[in-house]
Amino acid sequence: MKRRQDLHMNEDSLERMSNLYSGRALLEFNINQTIAENHLLFDRVRRFLDITRAVHKRWIYVSKYILSLSDECVLIDVFDEFHIKASTSHSISAASCNIFYNKIKNSGNELFVELLDYEDYVNQHPGRHYIYSKDNKDKKNILVPYDLESLYLSIMFYARASAPSFLYKTILTEPGVIYKESV
């Protein structure tokens, strides 16, 4: 039978994990690093790319739009928090997406959150929060303040054309015509 402390992360392993998932260390590169430091950097990069890939796989188009209009630091923040917040998720992909979604939600940008939810709806993701329609059959449905359909189509067009990030700033948002209903 394993000892209780073997089942939980001790302080040494927590320190190693925080060192491994350090966004600051990922951004700092020293040409005079030791071989061990180079291996650690490679492992950091690999894990960062795994997290980034998971986010881009779930939100194929919207994630590029969000990162173009905000900054790439959102992914660095996700990476920094990964070792702490990922323990409640069942996979790296789910953890990455949950942390990213919560980061965007906590940033206060309502448009970005609506777009993430809308892309989940379009892709019929099992974890989606809302159903969208142009009809307000139930008078309790909420009118989204943005025309998500035309905005999403523009974002999809730009992404498929491999548009550089500065072009995403030219996409205009129009008043809403779509209602959302909680799942």
Image (spheres, rainbow, N blue to C red):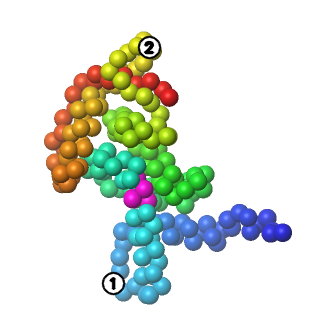
Q: Main secondary structure of the magenta part?
A: helix
Locate residue 100 relative to residue 155 in the image: left or right. Answer: right
Q: Secondary structure at mark 2?
A: loop
Front-most of residues 4 and 179: 179
Q: Does dot 1 land on a helix, a strand or a loop? A: loop
Relative to residue 55, is residue 35 depicted above or below?
below
Residue 54 part of the magenta-drawn span: yes
Classify residue 97 as left or right of residue 1. left
Quadrant in which the N terminus is drawn: bottom right
Other residues around mark 2 within 10 Å, as few (<14) / some (14–19) / many (≥20) = few
Q: Where residue 175 appears, x then y in whole percent?
A: 24, 24
Query: Does residue 129 appear anywhere in the picture?
Result: yes
Q: Which residues are magenta?
A: 51-55
- Mark count: 2
| 10 Å crowding of disc 1: few (<14), some (14-19), many (20+) | few
Residue 5, percent across and down?
76, 66
Q: Residue 165: within the magenta?
A: no
Q: Quadrant of residue 151?
A: top left
* Residue type, label 1: Ile
For marks 2 and 1, give the CA distance: 62 Å
Image side of residue 173 versus residue 180, left or right: left
Tag 1 residue:
31
x and y percentages locating residue 115 in the rendered image: 34, 37
Evaluate whether residue 108 shows in this view. no
Q: Which residue is mark 2?
A: 138
Q: Nearer the viewer, mark 2 or mark 1?
A: 2
Residue at the (38%, 27%) spot, across then down: 132
Three-letter amino acid code at the position of disc 2:
Asp
